[in-house]
Image (cartoon, grey):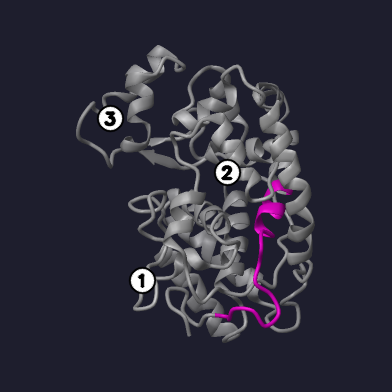
């Protein structure tokens, strides 16, 4: 009980700051300055996903990992330089996040139609939405006007991005630290209805843990041996890996969550009822997911004269 009291206390202090920091964002931010921006991003995302279906989940994940480190400011895209070490080599990112080349391609296409106008942070937010739509998921109105950071934080990336071995309480705390509720955490976790994970991320879950259906864990062991094969991939949602649906939650109820952190959402704890609800109402999941994505996308954006609009997403101007 004390834990939840502390979370609520934190949220009461944090959320007013959160609301104020996102007040300058607008769905029409580029209507005059770059009216072709959204269409250009959408077209590029569709082409990238058509070329490689996995890229949709990768672009969605880039936005998530960006927002959890000092806000949605494009910092995850920055390469190391002489003044700072970037976030790409953080524990939750190295050999994991991908799609930087696709973001660079999108940026170059946007620059071609309106140079120096659209931020890399906004491109990540729009590309995440368009990726979900490509897989049959919900759409939402992306608020725009973020500017790009001129620095990055390896230490914040190491501490803020939830681990695939996280417990339920750790997940709740990680999301609460970003102003996101327990319910929003469960909804956002549904992004794992698409995408894949490396063997090293779920090996302990399939060999050492009991909260997993035995036939399912055995079936995974051929592609993820007890030693070796760290980079071998398995779908996060084996039942419908290329469709954005509520199958992820049905898997959890059947103890077929690929990651330890996934299965923690349905393990006799406070989130079981919400998971159960999503298994019977995809529309509720879609509505909650879209709403939570808007809120996550508004975490501590740089606006006005803060930051910059990078010409190239991997380096400051």
Closest to the observer, 200 or 81: 81
Query: Residue 140 at what x, y percent from top left?
Result: 72, 54
In front of the other: 149 or 52: 149
- Between discs 1 and 2, the one toward the N terminus: 1
Q: Where 165 sits versus 305, above or below?
A: above
Magenta region: which residues? 291-309
Alpha carbon distance from label 1 to label 2: 26 Å
Helix, strand or loop: magenta stretch: loop
Question: Could you tell me which secondary element the residue under label 2 belongs to?
Answer: helix
Q: Position of residue 103 (x, y in %)?
A: 47, 67
Residue shown at the point (75%, 69%) measured from the top left: 25
User: Of callouts 3 and 1, which one flags the residue occurring earlier in the amino acid sequence?
Assistant: 1
Q: Residues within 10 Å of mark 3 (few under 14, many from 20)?
A: some
Viewport quadrant of the N terminus: top right
**Left or right: 97, with 255 as reference point:** left
Per the image, the residue denoted by label 3 is: 223
**Sequence-first tag of 2 and 3:** 2
């Amino acid at each position: 009980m004390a834990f939840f009291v502390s979370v609520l206390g934190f949220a009461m202090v944090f959320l007013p700051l959160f609301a104020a920091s996102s007040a300058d964002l607008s769905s029409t931010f580029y209507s005059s300055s770059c009216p072709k921006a959204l269409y250009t991003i959408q077209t590029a995302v569709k082409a990238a996903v058509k070329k490689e279906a996995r890229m949709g989940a990768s672009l969605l994940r880039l936005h998530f990992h960006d927002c959890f480190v000092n806000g949605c400011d494009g910092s995850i895209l920055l390469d190391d330089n002489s003044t700072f070490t970037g976030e790409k080599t953080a524990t939750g990112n190295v050999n994991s996040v991908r799609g930087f080349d696709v973001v660079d391609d999108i940026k170059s296409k946007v620059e071609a139609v309106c140079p120096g106008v659209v931020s890399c942070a906004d491109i990540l937010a729009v590309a995440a939405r368009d990726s979900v739509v490509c897989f049959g998921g919900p759409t939402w109105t992306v608020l725009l006007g973020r500017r790009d950071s001129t620095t990055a934080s390896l230490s914040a990336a190491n501490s803020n991005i939830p681990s695939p071995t996280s417990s339920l309480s750790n997940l709740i705390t990680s999301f609460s630290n970003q102003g996101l509720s327990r319910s929003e955490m469960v909804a956002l976790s549904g992004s794992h209805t698409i995408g894949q994970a490396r063997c090293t991320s779920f090996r302990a879950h399939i060999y050492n843990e009991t909260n997993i259906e035995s036939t399912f864990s055995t079936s995974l062991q051929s592609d993820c041996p007890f030693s070796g094969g760290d980079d071998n991939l398995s779908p996060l949602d084996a039942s419908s890996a290329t469709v954005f649906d509520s199958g992820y939650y049905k898997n959890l109820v059947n103890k077929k969550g690929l990651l330890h952190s996934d299965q923690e959402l349905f393990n006799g704890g406070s989130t079981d009822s919400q998971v159960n609800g999503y298994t019977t109402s995809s529309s509720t999941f879609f509505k909650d997911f879209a709403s939570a994505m808007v809120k996550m996308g508004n975490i501590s954006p740089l606006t006005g004269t803060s930051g910059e609009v990078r010409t190239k997403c991997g380096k400051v101007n």
